[in-house]
């Protein structure tokens, strides 16, 4: 029987997934971001294996940044990433965080739009990937 749960994980638990999905040409240590040691890392686990993860970085007392959201290819488009993302947004809202932002890959903006994220700055390119800054006002968000 398959069991799944969402929980806080360690940075080491998500590095391989980050590399495999987001930066396959990078070395594992190149997938560590400044501030990772202080970030909160979340994982969606199936039979104790991390199949989706993301990291939440503290920016101000009322603002957080979500970074490095990745789901194993085989599990994409099954609602797993959406479940993890929604759970994290609910937790941030419960903790009275007022807003959350992220730099969405241009190919993933529709995903974030489903959660009512909006564009707030101009797109940019890093390592040949185009990103679009998006944010959500959690004080007005209805996350069900």
Image: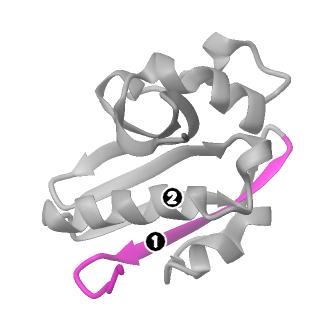
Where is residue 11 shown, x and y percent of the image? 44, 22
Whether residue 40 can be seen here? yes
Q: Nearer the viewer, residue 47 or 134?
A: 47
- Magenta span includes 135: yes
Residue 135: assigned label: 1
Dot 2 and dot 1 residues touching (CB under 8 Å) = yes
Q: Nearer the viewer, residue 5 or 111?
A: 5
Q: Which residue is mark 2?
A: 102
- Magenta span includes 34: no
Residue at 47% from the left image edge and 42% from the top image edge: 3
Residue at 82% from the left image edge and 27% from the top image edge: 24
For marks 2 and 1 on the same chain, the one whose residue lies earlier in the sequence: 2
Residue at 35% from the left image edge and 64% from the top image edge: 89
On screen, residue 42 above or below 77: above
- The residue stretch that appears in magenta: 128-144
Whether residue 55 can be seen here? no
Q: Secondary structure at mark 1?
A: strand
Location of the C terminus by quadrant is bottom left
Residue 107: assigned label: none
Quadrant in the rendering for residue 10: top left
Where is residue 31 shown, x and y percent of the image? 62, 23
């Amino acid at each position: 029987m398959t069991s799944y749960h969402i929980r806080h994980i360690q940075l080491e638990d998500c590095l391989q997934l980050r590399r495999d999905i987001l930066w396959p040409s990078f070395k594992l240590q190149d997938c560590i971001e400044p501030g990772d040691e202080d970030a909160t890392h979340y994982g969606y686990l199936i039979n104790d294996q991390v199949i989706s993860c993301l990291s939440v970085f503290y920016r101000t007392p009322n603002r957080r940044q979500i970074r490095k959201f990745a789901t194993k290819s085989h599990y994409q488009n099954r609602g797993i990433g959406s479940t993890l993302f929604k759970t994290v947004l609910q937790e941030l809202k419960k903790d009275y965080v007022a807003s959350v932002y992220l730099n969405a890959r241009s190919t993933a903006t529709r995903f974030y739009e489903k959660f009512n994220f909006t564009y707030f700055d101009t797109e940019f390119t890093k390592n040949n990937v185009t990103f679009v800054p998006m944010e959500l006002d959690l004080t007005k968000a209805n996350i069900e």
